[in-house]
Amino acid sequence: MYALGLLNKFEVIKPGSEARAEAVFDENSPVFNGHFPDNPILPGVLQMALVMEAAQKLLGTQLEITEVKQSKFRTPVKPGDRVEITVEASVAEEGAYILRAVLQKMDKNEQDAGPSSFRMTVIRL
């Protein structure tokens, strides 16, 4: 469901609980079409899809979001930006996980307001 192939790199830090991934968005990528014509930025839903794609690789299963407990989109991701996604997963109950994630721009060529962060509950499909 969330395997969009957006991640360029993926690394397990702690099996079953923590991973790091990277995504780079080409200036001609269709993900920026219409969002916004004069100031393209990566839509928030695609930032969450990056988190889900990394979480699915970490946990080795398809996941579905059941609740977004927190989402802070602090730094706009623009064409050409390279971002690092760190995901931590903990078991909430059988078949359900709490995900904590941070999405940070790797290239600091402009002032930003800090990393974007997410906390959500997901279930295994």
Image (cartoon, rainbow, N blue to C red):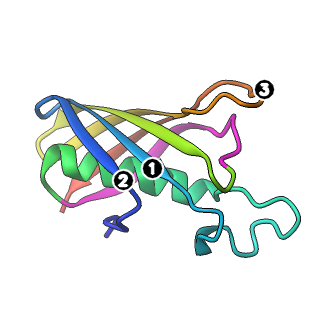
Q: Name, please, the residue furthest toward the right.
A: 38
**In terms of secondary structure, what is the magenta stretch mainly?**
strand
> Was residue 41 drawn as part of the magenta stretch in this picture?
no
Placement of 14 over or under 38, stated as above or below: above
Contact (Cβ within 8 Å) of mark 1 with mark 2: yes
Name the kind of residue labelled 2 in the image: Asn
Lower sequence index among marks 1 and 2: 2
Residue 52 in the image: x percent, y percent?
Answer: 36, 52
Instruction: Please state if 114 lies on the left or on the right of 83 as rendered.
Output: right
Residue at figure coordinates x 44%, y 57% from the top left: 49
Q: CA distance from mark 1 to mark 2?
A: 5 Å
Magenta-tinted stretch:
62-77
Q: Is residue 14 above or below residue 26?
A: above
* Residue 12 located left or right of residue 109: left
For label 3, the residue is 111
- Tell me which label, 3 or 1, sits earlier in the chain: 1
Is 124 displayed left or right of 103 in the figure? left
Q: Residues within 10 Å of mark 1 (few under 14, many from 20)?
A: many
Q: Earlier in the sequence, mark 2 or mark 3?
A: 2
Mark 3 falls on what kind of element? Answer: loop
**Residue 38 spot, x, y in % from top left:** 88, 65
Circle on res. 23: 1
Residue in the picture at 64% in, 57% down: 42
Q: Label 1 is placed on what type of residue? A: Ala
Residue at mark 2: 8
Quarter of the rendering containing residue 12:
top left
Q: Where is residue 119? Give x, y as percent.
A: 45, 35
Above or below — where is 125 with respect to 83?
Answer: below
